[in-house]
Amino acid sequence: LAKTTQPISMDSYEGQEVNITCSHNNIATNDYITWYQQFPSQGPRFIIQGYKTKVTNEVASLFIPADRKSSTLSLPRVSLSDTAVYYCLVGDISGNQFYFGTGTSLTVIP
Amino acid sequence: EAQVTQNPRYLITVTGKKLTVTCSQNMNHEYMSWYRQDPGLGLRQIYYSMNVEVTDKGDVPEGYKVSRKEKRNFPLILESPSPNQTSLYFCASSWSSGEKGNEQFFGPGTRLTVL
């Protein structure tokens, strides 16, 4: 079960692009990288998942370098409503154990 | 509406009084899981189930039991609750394999206080 390392917290001004990097040096060949978002007193919500290179959806982009030992979640033009905790997970898509850790607490400032 | 429901949402109880937190999903997911969330410790997995009658321990299973008799339900049982089980609990479900295997859907949470 690969563990991940993320910054504990980040601040950003409204309208800026935010990049949160996650380190996963022990990622296995079959592992995918998944990001979740959690607002206070709510359950986490799936944002994006990728295996290699770049993935983009309506919410975010995920950049994964060739060695896959890290990944970067990119949130374009953040707003106050993007203030949340963001979790990076690594695991097999048919896996069963998930390690969320403490995530990165993002605060968007007006 | 596709969702995961948990009951109760809030519970205050006393040490040693058995309790059950129910979890139900309507998406026909094979995989279900329980997590607890504590300040400074993040979200930790308690138990998970790959399918009916298949359950296994997560990172912090001590003091908890689960059962999976039906696909849609995955109750969390605390036989003898203790104050260190005071926490925010989340249930989640997902497909067990394929590209959607890591996309878990979470319930609204149950805030448990054990006095």
Image: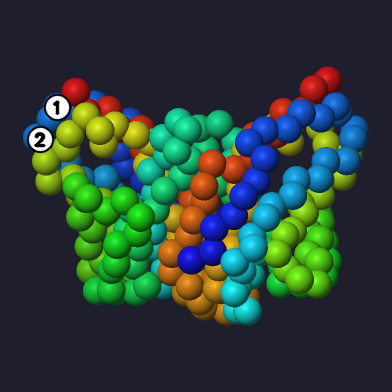
Q: Is residue B109 above or below residue B98?
A: above
- Going 59% across and 74% down the picture, which residue do you hit? A28
Q: Which residue is mark 2?
A: B17
Which residue occupies the foreground of this view, B114 or B106?
Answer: B114
Q: Amino acid at mark 1?
A: Val
* Image height of A76 relative to A70, above or below: above
Q: Quadrant of residue A50?
A: bottom right
**B31 or A97: which is nearer to us?**
A97
Place of residue B15 in the rendered image (x, y in percent of width and height, measured from the top left) = 13, 30
Kindly state the secondary structure of the residue where label 2 is placed: loop
Looking at the image, residue A8 sits to the left or right of residue A42; the answer is right
Colour option used: rainbow
Q: Residue at x 39, y 59 (%)?
A: B33
User: Mark 2 — on which chain does it sit?
Assistant: B
Circle 2: is it few (<14), some (14-19), or many (20+) Cα within 10 Å?
A: few
Total number of numbered labels?
Answer: 2
The image shows residue B18 at horizontal and vertical percentages of: 12, 41
Circle 1 SS class: loop
* Mark 1 lies on residue: B14
Disc 1 from disc 2: Cα separation = 6 Å
Residue B5 can be seen, yes or no: no
- At 75% from the left and 45% from the top, the residue drawn is A20
Residue A39, located in which quarter of the rendered image? Answer: top right
Asked if the residues shown at circle 1 and circle 2 are in contact, with their CB atoms under 8 angstroms apart, the answer is yes
Amino acid type at circle 2 is: Lys
Q: Residue at x 42, y 48 (%)?
A: B44
Whole-percent x, y for residue B3 in the image: 49, 54
Chain letter behind tag 1: B
Q: Is residue B63 visible?
A: yes
Quadrant where the image shows the C terminus of chain B:
top left
